[in-house]
Image: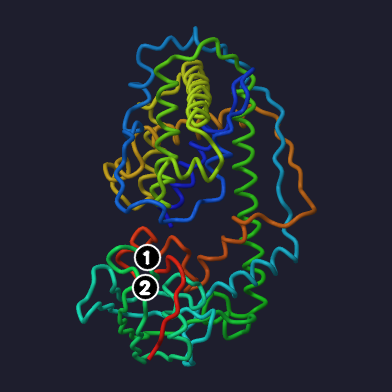
Amino acid sequence: MRKKTMWTVCVLTLGLLASGCSKGQEESSAAKNTSSAAPEAGATEAGQSSQTEDVTNTTFAELMEGIDVASCVTLGDYKGLSLTKEIQQVTDEDVQKAIDSAVSTTLQEVDEAAAEGDTVNIDYVGTLDGEEFDGGSAEGYDLVLGSHSFIDGFEDGLVGCKAGEEKKLNLTFPANYNEELGGKDVVFKVKVNAVKRAAKEISEEWVLANTDSASIEDYGRATRVQLEESNAANAEYNLQSAAWQTVVEGSTINQYPEKLVEFGSAVYANQLESYCQYYNVSLDDYLSTVGSSKEEYEEQKKNYGENLAAQLLVMAAIESAEGLSNEDDEYHTLLEQYVTDSGMDQDAFISYYGTFNVEQTIMMKRISDLIIANATVSEKVSESGSSTQEAEESQAPETEESQPSETEGSQPSESDESQSPETAGSTASETE
């Protein structure tokens, strides 16, 4: 949880660096493209290696070396701004939605036969002609029955099983699966360790078993407090974002140093490559999915590079004007605070997040605080609409066990389709 807190701060910094626009510059479409619906995993071979150098393992001083900031940027007003901090009001509907979400995503073990929609924790071993095949086995695997994440017959064969039961599944891989397993008959020996499902509605027993509250009423109050705290944090984040964007848009970029544009372009490429690797797709497949050409991708990289260069120049200009430094006492105090919150030592912390990210996270906080401290900030309470997804998700820490997300646990990706019983098509199969 502490690591996530710092990561949120890093996202704030990088998000601001990625979203602001310099005066006279159109907003880049890069952010929109990278947030498009993810293509299906498994379009490329597993283990594709990184082709882009990690450019963030540098320091701000090294990056800005040789650049005449004063000639590159004319700094606009960053003091005396008028800003609005909008706070979302928490409604009874918001509280109920958050409670319903927590109940529907919190799994509890049951001593009943597994049904479609339940999650079964299983150990399984797959054999072909009596021999285990690579990647066809796992222990402690959480599988949602009816998710169709395994080949036909696997999940259906576990419906009706109870914890402690063992099952042998005689299955056939789809003909188009891969050269090794496509069309082959295999046997999976499966042991069901547990059957888990979410409650249909909240109860006093559920509250006592899954939260720190003593009753449904107490849990409702605690949920409201969490939503209010989350909304307040979101309001602060949005205020900082708006303050920074206002300052960048109010400044004039006289020239874009090639060094900074190349840096920003490389950051964009790194981010997109990480995205593609996470979903195990090639860049070409990704661009095809979002309907973008290589030429458009290169233009997006350039726009992103200029966008980031503009913000780095504005940041450097404010640092110079205010006498801020990554060597002063305030910087080191904040660094020590983040390191302590992370639970890591300083070397591990910097290695984990990257020198540039750490420096810019801390400097962005200092600059944002300075801008807001010297601004006229009015508060506005929004009385309509529901709370944000982040607010609803803030309930998760209070429950003792939540349904794992797609990125949690040991679920093999479809890139491992040559080594796992996951589906790549459909075929009839038999269960024993």
Q: Residue at x 35, y 72 (%)?
A: 183
Q: Which amino acid does label 2 sit on?
A: Phe
Which type of secondary structure does the marked residue at label 2 adopt?
loop
Where 23 sits versus 416, above or below? Answer: above
Q: Which amino acid does label 1 sit on?
A: Tyr
> In terms of depth relative to the viewer, which is nearer, 409 or 178?
178
> In terms of depth relative to the viewer, which is nearer, 323 or 50?
50
Residue 368, by quadrant, is top right
Q: Residue at x 42, y 15 (%)?
A: 258
- The residue lying furthest to the left in this view is 131
Image quarter hosting the C terminus: bottom left
Q: Residue at x 29, y 72 (%)?
A: 136
Residue 136 in view:
yes
Is 364 displayed left or right of 226 in the figure?
Answer: left
Where 390 sits versus 330, above or below? Answer: below
- Binning the other alpha carbons within 10 Å of mark 1 as few (below 14), some (14 to 19) or many (20 upward) gives many
- Binning the other alpha carbons within 10 Å of mark 2 as few (below 14), some (14 to 19) or many (20 upward) gives many
Residue 415, by quadrant, is bottom left
Image quarter hosting the N terminus: bottom left
Cα gap from disc 1 to disc 2, whole angstroms = 7 Å
Looking at the rendered structure, the number of numbered marks drawn on it comes to 2
Look at the numbered discs 1 and 2 and tell me whether their residues touch, using CB distance below 8 Å.
yes
x, y percent for residue 332: 37, 34
Judging by the rendered image, the residue that carries numbered circle 2 is: 173
x, y percent for residue 184: 31, 74
Judging by the rendered image, the residue that carries numbered circle 1 is: 177
Residue 325, numbered label: none
> In terms of depth relative to the viewer, which is nearer, 377 or 253?
253
x, y percent for residue 153: 43, 80
